[in-house]
Image (cartoon, rainbow, N blue to C red):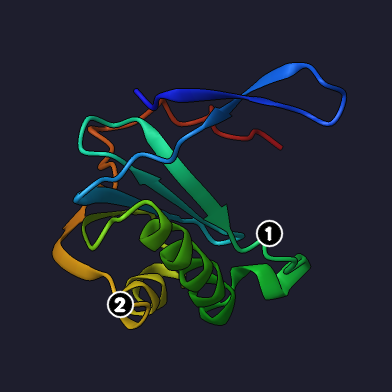
Amino acid sequence: MAKAQTQKGKSGKTTKKRIKRQLPEGVLYVQATFNNTILTLTDPKGDVVAWNSAAAEGFRGSRKSTPFAAGEAAKKLALVAKEFGIRQVHVKVKGPGPGRESAVRAIEAGGIKVLSITDVTGIPHNGVRDPKKRRV
């Protein structure tokens, strides 16, 4: 848990200032859908440290689902990760979208060492029942 410091604000009231915790390594979850790529950075315990997405970077519509948009979101997340002291991550990729590989490459280009890449895409075990056949 991050410690808090008290300090005087503009109005003279005491406010709490959160101190960013220093983490040696983290876990990066890349959820790549056909419409967007969402990146979530957590500590090894699973608590979210930071997140970013192609949509949060200002990409809209069909540009949001491009590998370039995923790479830009990952570059910005790499900068935030460095602020927290994260130098190495385990990457868990989920989904079939086009931003899978470019997000991981952008994280490496941002100066963060990728220790492992795991595909955690769900596999349906028979799924739901098919809709009844149409009678015309």
Q: Where residue 63 sits: x, y (%)?
A: 70, 75
Give the labeled residue for mark 2: 111
Question: What secondary structure is marked by label 2?
Answer: loop
The disc, 1 or 2, on the residue closer to the chain's N-terminal end is: 1
Query: Which of the pair 25/135 is nearer the observer?
Result: 25
Residue 32 in picture, x, y percent from top left: 45, 58
For the point 26% across and 32% down, the residue is 126
Quarter of the figure with residue 39 = bottom left
- Label 2 crowding class (10 Å Cα cut-off): few <14, some 14-19, many 20+? some
Q: Is residue 63 left or right of residue 113?
A: right
Q: Where is residue 11 in the image (x, y as percent from the top left)?
A: 87, 24
The residue drawn where x is 35% and y is 39% is 21
Percent across and percent down for residue 125 are 22, 33
> Which amino acid, mark 1?
Ala
In the rendering, which numbered label is found on residue 55? 1
Q: State left or right for residue 96 relative to residue 125.
A: right
Residue 125, placed above or below residue 26: above
- Between the C-alphas of marks 1 and 2, the distance is 23 Å
